[in-house]
Amino acid sequence: MSMSRVRRMAWVVAVAAADTALLWLVGTEGWALAAFAAVTGLAMAVSPRRPLAAFLVALSLAVLTGGSYALLVCTGYQAGHRISWRRDAIVAFVATVAHLGALLMIAQRTAFAPDPFVVLARAGVLTALPVLAGRYLAQQREHQRRERELTAERERLHERLRIARDMHDSLGHLLGLVSVQAAALEVAALPAEQRGTVRSLASTARTAMAELHEVVGALRHADRPGVEGIDELVARAAAAGLTVTVERSGSAAPLAEADAGHAAHRVVQEGLTNAAKHAPGAPIRVSLDWQPDALLVSVANPAVTRTGRVTSGGVGLAGLSERVRAAGGLLRVHAEPYEFRLVAMLPLAQGAVGAPA
């Protein structure tokens, strides 16, 4: 049996024992106590796979028995940590509000009714606080995962660039010498039967050089998502709980630089990451506007901070600005009082300028 499974079973036993002991202390005995212990243990056992169902069971037991404190905390944390669908989050919120209302109604009908503020504080500590803590830690883990993916992507890019440089420096140099020697033989005085062979050799060397350049270019740009990958990026952000809308205008056209599409992708990626970090829960608007001579990419979200201002700089934005500038474009950060907006302008190819938008 693995250690993780042993720890999970230990948590199930500990929570069931703690809540059962509390219920026994207030006078519950017999089959009612045994049924409570069984339901508590079952809810804890299924909470990693069915966090919402376990949380609803805990809320029901808390209303029926007035206890289930440990179960509420554990299942609330699991619900906040693992629930990703908005529908499940709404169900959990409604159930928590209903639980609070039921506690207030029970308190009013009790002879020695506790103060409503005491009921609210207890419900907040046992339900809302664990859910929020679980949700916060889940968002932090997702943010760290995205950072690890970005780091791994940068490492792969550096390795591809190193391989491309090595191939260009070594094979390119040798093939260049072969091409020069073959060209010299082409103009030399050779017998007729050898001229055809020399011309074939020179043509093969030039073809090999061209193919080497293509391979080097492919190594430099392989697996680098462009504008077409923005939809997938937005879909992943929505699946992680962000509210993202995409607006498109104009007719798509080729960009001027090979890296421009990847730069546009990174602008959207950085904007989504900043919005999730500095304005969690706020709606995000991604805009792709194809102008006659440029693509305008913007990511905007309401400014949600304690001071009413948004930080508008950082290593990520500085590196992004360099990437956009290397692709021939411009990046601007607009940190307005009520909105944070990231805007990049990337020029279109020469043949696309003047095309109808």
Image: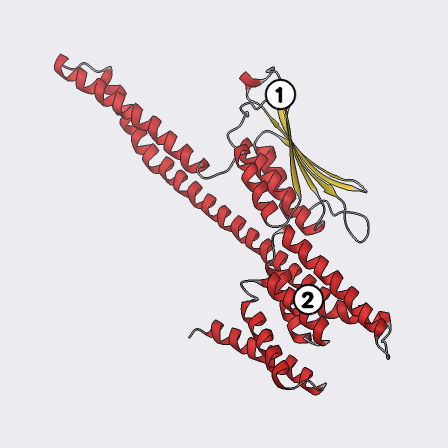
**Residue identifier under label 2:** 130
Q: Amino acid at mark 2?
A: Pro
Tell me: residue 312, above or below residue 227: below
View extreme (top): residue: 192
Tell me: residue 106, above or below residue 29: above
Distance of label 1 from label 2 (alpha carbons): 52 Å
For the N terminus, which image quadrant?
bottom left
Callout 1 secondary element: loop
Tell me residue 298's x, y (percent).
67, 35
Tell me residue 277's x, y (percent).
67, 51
Callout 2 secondary element: helix
Identify the residue shown where x is 55% and y is 33%: 227
Identify the residue shown where x is 62% and y is 30%: 329
Tell me: residue 258, above or below residue 316: above
**Residue identifier under label 1:** 293
In-image side of 130 versus 326 (left or right): right
Tell me residue 177's x, y (percent).
29, 29
